[in-house]
Image: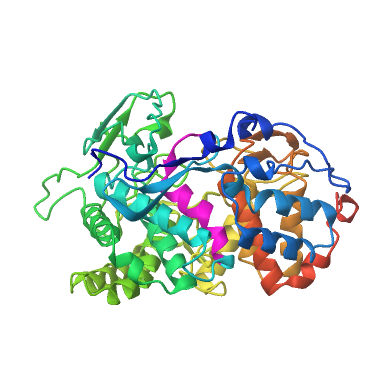
Amino acid sequence: MWTCNAIVLAPLLISHVLGQSCPGYSSFSQSRSPPLSTGAYKLAYQRPAPECRTFNSSLVEDAIAQVKGEIYDVDLSRLFENTFPNTLDTAIKWRGVAANNTEEELAFIITGDINAMWIRDSANQIAPYKVVLKNQTSELASLFRGVINLQARYLIISPYCNAFQPPPESGMPPEQNGGIYSVTPAYDRNVVFTCNFELDDFGGFLQLSHDYYTATGDADFFGKFQWIPAVQSILAASEAMRQPTYGPDGKWLRPEYTFQSQTMSASGTLANNGVGMPVNYTGMARSPFRPSDDSALFDFSVPANMMLSRYLDSTAGIVDRLPNAPKELAGRMRDMAAEIRAAISHWGVVGAPDGKQVFAYEVDGFGGQNLMDDANIPSLLSAPFLGYLDKNDTVYRNTREFILGRKNPWWCEGPYINAIGSPHVRPGAAWPMSAIMRAMTSDDDLEIITAVKEVLRSTDGYGLIHESVNSFDTSDWTRQWFTWANGLFGQMIMDLADRKPHLLKESFQPFFINKD
């Protein structure tokens, strides 16, 4: 329960601890702070002073020092040292414990320039640090547990919602977003910031759980607090969202979730008075909203279902080790994972205009299919990164060829960056996140080098990863503080240091770029 009589341990409100001398990162990140890197891009130094960072980890600092020593290019080195720790430096808004259990760690992670905690974003913001997480005793492990515990609480209270207010234990006031909504099930605005149902929130929570368990082997943690009820909440909501629009007798079935908002954007609300477009039964779960927070064209998101299937299956192994878990729970997780995987193979693989079999981005089970990809993760491009399939899978290779080019309506091409964009912004605005994911899902050295070069020259000298960049004008970008994308770039460099260390010895200076 959220209601409490007293807070049993003084909460750590990071902004109070930092004091008044530390500049807000929204303004700090808009300055090209010295010392600039000595390469052609002259990238700003974007780390706050140590006393102004919201979380300090010796494990992360040691990794930064080690990998910087392996990077030849001074601009690439600067971009790595800015981005990899960005979530820890700037976004750990509060850490503490539950009011009713001092053993239950909690951590509230803001998405960057928005003072709310997204389930998906917070999972992705913390995930890059799994590479240095070795055991359960470090402060970094405590941070992972705090995020998982708070996500679990949110998923139990409002499983159909995607972004949340600070917990009452923090003493922080709710952040009102000013929107006008009509949503079922109803929710408490003092708890929920926005309530767009995005299936990948479930996948994000399970993925972070998988990452923590894989790194530490700490199964006991998952049986102590609210993780099991959160998994049960995920299963119940996912099952409800598998329901078709019409029953066997043709009668309309009222959906569990509806959403209407007063908005100037067609992608900010659902059609048919908040019900969404009709779907047939497929075995997949509906996702009325995409990872970008935009409404879907067709509700069965193939990449979101890939993610859910993959991590339901892997985290069932955690449940197997919990003596207090319901005996049928792991089996239910594996059954749903298998059913979703079969549904993707049946409904999500379609013929492209050139006759090749590809994954659709979205389908409706009636024959409707959306052939595209969006930069936000989970994406079709990210399927191997998610662990759903091998990068040499034939349908994936065909899909990759389709989405990394002009056949994809959201492919953005230009002299500075060539990458997938998103309807969340506009055509022509490439998302560096997709160029990063392209490198992380490739074994081809030239493809990786090209992607890294394009990201490096897209920062407009700020030394941070933007949400989107005009592929013809790198000074035209959105979001200067986007910790998810920053962390992903750092994760990519850590990945290259492990599997392709020779690429970090390359120069990424602009005179190596073919401008023809």
Q: Of 413 and 480, which appears nearest the observer? A: 480
* Residue farthest along the left direction in this orientation: 249
Give the x, y percent position of residue 375: 55, 49
Answer whether residue 115 is magenta in the image.
yes
Give the x, y percent position of residue 435: 65, 54
Q: Is residue 487 left or right of residue 415?
A: left
Quarter of the image for residue 18 reads top right
What residue do we see at 84% from left, 46% from top? 37
Q: How many callouts does the rendering have?
A: 0
What residue do we see at 39% from left, 24% from top? 263
Residue 501 in sight here: yes
Quarter of the image for residue 507 reads bottom right
What residue do we see at 10% from left, 46% from top? 251
Q: Of 149 and 209, which appears nearest the observer? A: 149
Give the x, y percent position of residue 471: 71, 41
Say above or below: 292 vs 452: above
Say above or below: 38 vs 116: below
Q: Is residue 252 left or right of residue 131?
A: left
- Scheme of colours in the image: rainbow
Give the x, y percent position of residue 493: 69, 61
Q: Give the range drawn in magenta.
A: 114-130
Report the quarter where the N terminus lies. top left
Q: Is the magenta stretch mostly helix, strand or loop?
A: helix
Q: Of 211 and 9, which appears nearest the observer? A: 9
Answer whether residue 282 is magenta in the image.
no
Quarter of the image for residue 267 reads top left
What residue do we see at 25% from left, 42% from top? 2
Q: Of 87 and 495, which appears nearest the observer? A: 87
Residue 433 in sight here: no
